[in-house]
Amino acid sequence: MPEGPEIETEKLHEAVQEELEKEGGGFLRQIALSTALLAALAAIAALQAGATVNEALVLKTEATRLQAQASDQWAYYQAKGIKSAVQEAARAPWIAIAKEPPASYADAAKHYAAEQADIRKKAEYFERQRDDKSREADELLHRHHGFANAVALFQVSIALGAVAALTRARPMWIGSMALGIAGAAMFGYHLLH
């Protein structure tokens, strides 16, 4: 007496494969492969988005540091201006009583004015550096937004691909691929610029 019904599994497997082919197994394979490709592109775009925003944040931090240095130089510039004004104010009483003020007052005022010129150059240098860093960061943030938008398109495309696989709706898959191609184009554009 047999232990159970004997079924030839190889023929059953072939029958299942035939039914899958009839039911759209090839189509499901296309959806799976395209969705996997879109997922890989989405991962790369997400990494690029993260990298560009991190670099932009570093540059913005550098711009802030440069702004602090410029502000320090401008404060130093003002201090030298005040010292020069004090020296000029010290000369005023001498001039008011029609006497020649000591030369040290005028020399000190000139010295402070000369120092102010050097300090101004440093402050303006830091401001130019700050502006360059900030501008570069803004460009990176723009690229980041492009990468982030590409990731969003990829994610929607992948979701539509899943719906297409569940419903076996070819128009849904075509829509998925159209969004995926748009995401790839956006990703490529921002990657190359």
Image (cartoon, rainbow, N blue to C red):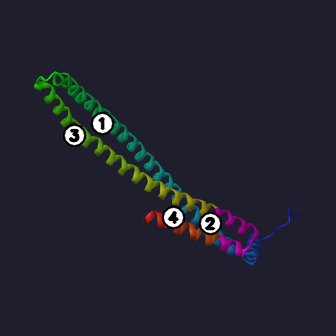
Q: What element carries label 4?
A: helix
> Is residue 60 within the magenta segment?
no
Q: Which of marks 3 and 4 is nearer the N terminus?
A: 3
Instruction: Say if mark 4 contacts mark 1, CB within 8 Å.
Output: no
Q: Which of marks 2 and 4 is nearer the N terminus?
A: 2
Label 3, residues with CA under 10 Å away: few <14, some 14-19, many ≥20: few
Q: Position of residue 189 (x, y in %)?
A: 47, 67
Residue at mark 2: 35
Amino acid carrying label 3: it is: Ala
Q: What element carries label 2?
A: helix
Picture quadrant where residue 22 is located: bottom right
Q: Where is residue 46 in the image (x, y as percent from the top left)?
A: 53, 56
> Is residue 174 within the magenta segment?
yes
Label 2, residues with CA under 10 Å away: few <14, some 14-19, many ≥20: many
Amino acid carrying label 4: it is: Phe
Measured in 3D between alpha carbons, the distance from the residue under mark 2 to the one under mark 4, in whole angstroms, is 16 Å
Amino acid carrying label 2: it is: Thr
Of marks 4 and 1, the one in the foreground:
1
Measured in 3D between alpha carbons, the distance from the residue under mark 3 to the one under mark 4, in whole angstroms, is 48 Å
Q: Is mark 1 on a helix, strand or loop?
A: helix
Residue at mark 3: 117
Instruction: Say if mark 2 contacts mark 1, CB within 8 Å.
Output: no
Q: Which of marks 2 and 1 is nearer the N terminus?
A: 2
In front here: 124 or 153? Answer: 124
Q: Earlier in the sequence, mark 4 or mark 1?
A: 1
- Determine whether, in the image, residue 6 is placed left or right of residue 18: right
Measured in 3D between alpha carbons, the distance from the residue under mark 2 to the one under mark 1, in whole angstroms, is 57 Å
Q: 144 above or below 12? A: above
The segment highlighted magenta reads 156-175
Instruction: Say if mark 2 contacts mark 3, CB within 8 Å.
Output: no
Residue at mark 4: 187
How many numbered circles are shown? 4
